[in-house]
Image: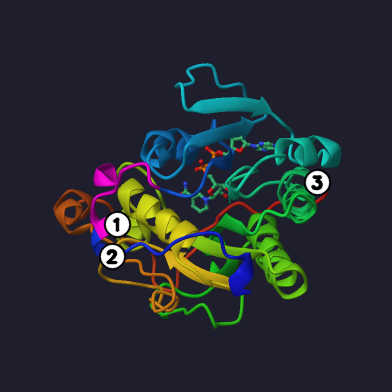
Amino acid sequence: MDDKNKYSHTTTNDMANLHTIQKTSPIHTLLLTGAAGSLGKALRPRLANICTRLRLSDVTPIHNLTNDEEFIACDLSQTAAVLHLCEGVDAILHFGGISLEGPFEPILQANILGSYNVYEAARQHGITRIIFASSNHVTGFYPQDETVSIHSQRRPDGFYGISKAFTEDLANYYYDRWGIESLCIRIGSSFPQPKDHRMLSTWLSYDDLTQLIHAGLTTPNIGCQLIYGVSANTPRWWSTEGTEKIPFHPLSSTDSFKAEIATQPLPPPGTPNGDTKEVVLLP
Ligand code: NAI
């Protein structure tokens, strides 16, 4: 797949401080789906040095655009609209969709059909690199004291996790069949700071997420790679496999938040690592 790879290599040192990276990236137009969401808002300023033009998309309008940004409203479940959205794009950060457990039908539309539309539009437009915001909920039914790897059998803890597992398979298929390379990041909990005991293990800082995205966009020949997106926290629930291919060296950890969170009650033994309490079934 070498001839399909448009991106140059970036060293670990370069990634240590993304704000020092000059605009030398060969990525001209980078599409960010889900740009109006929490991670979209956090990533926008952090992506400014990764590309020349950032195309933002969401069902929710975005008005505060910088000179290097453009916005195209798009419902990911609409095939023709997604095809139009991806026109002229060099790489995609696919972050749009429903981000929590809920009823199946909206997840089917936004996450399953939506991801199919994104990959199919990429194929039709010759886009060869996608970073997909997958989720730890693909393996959310493992107990918290068991270390899970990217090779562990999936144990999704809801329709949301199932939709992420579907897109990971979709990414594999589009690589094997069409050579479209993907980094599927099973994001832990990406928030400004960890909020509870679970997040002491699952937290991924915005800076570490940005580093991972940058590595995913610039590392050559990644094929279709899975990785857990988590900062350098202890205890760690997920193995570091994938980092031998994607140079990811998290710089954040939850250590400085432990004392504050220690006052909260501990989860009962045997709690699944996804800790998804909501169960959604038809009556
Ligand atoms: P979010 O819910 O804040 O943002 C998702 C965005 O997708 C929203 O702005 C929403 O309007 C948009 N969206 C929903 N349905 C859509 C559709 N049919 N068409 C177009 N846009 C649609 O979620 P957040 O936290 O920003 O997460 C971004 C991505 O990362 C999601 O895919 C989520 O599943 C994934 N993720 C996030 C984690 C986190 O800790 N924030 C953890 C694991 C995965």
Q: Position of residue 231 (x, y in %)?
A: 31, 61
- The residue at the point 45 percent across, 66 percent down is 219
Q: Are marks 2 and 3 in contact (CB under 8 Å)?
A: no
Q: Are marks 1 and 2 in contact (CB under 8 Å)?
A: yes
- The residue at the point 60 percent across, 81 percent down is 153
Determine the secondary structure under disc 1.
helix
Mark 1: amino acid: Met
The residue labelled by disc 2 is 12
Left or right, residue 228 beside residue 236: right
Ligand 1 rendered quadrant: top right
Q: Are marks 1 and 3 in contact (CB under 8 Å)?
A: no
Question: Under 8 Å from ligand 1: the CB of mark 1?
Answer: no
Q: CA distance from mark 1 to mark 3?
A: 39 Å
Left or right, residue 32 beside residue 97: left
Of tags 1 and 3, the one toward the viewer is 1
Q: Position of residue 196 (x, y in %)?
A: 32, 51
Q: Residues within 10 Å of mark 2 (few under 14, many from 20)?
A: few
The residue labelled by disc 3 is 105
Determine the secondary structure under disc 2.
helix
Mark 3: amino acid: Glu
The residue labelled by disc 1 is 15
**Mark closest to the chain's N terminus, 1 or 3:** 1
Along the viewing direction, whichever of 212 and 263 lies nearer the viewer? 212
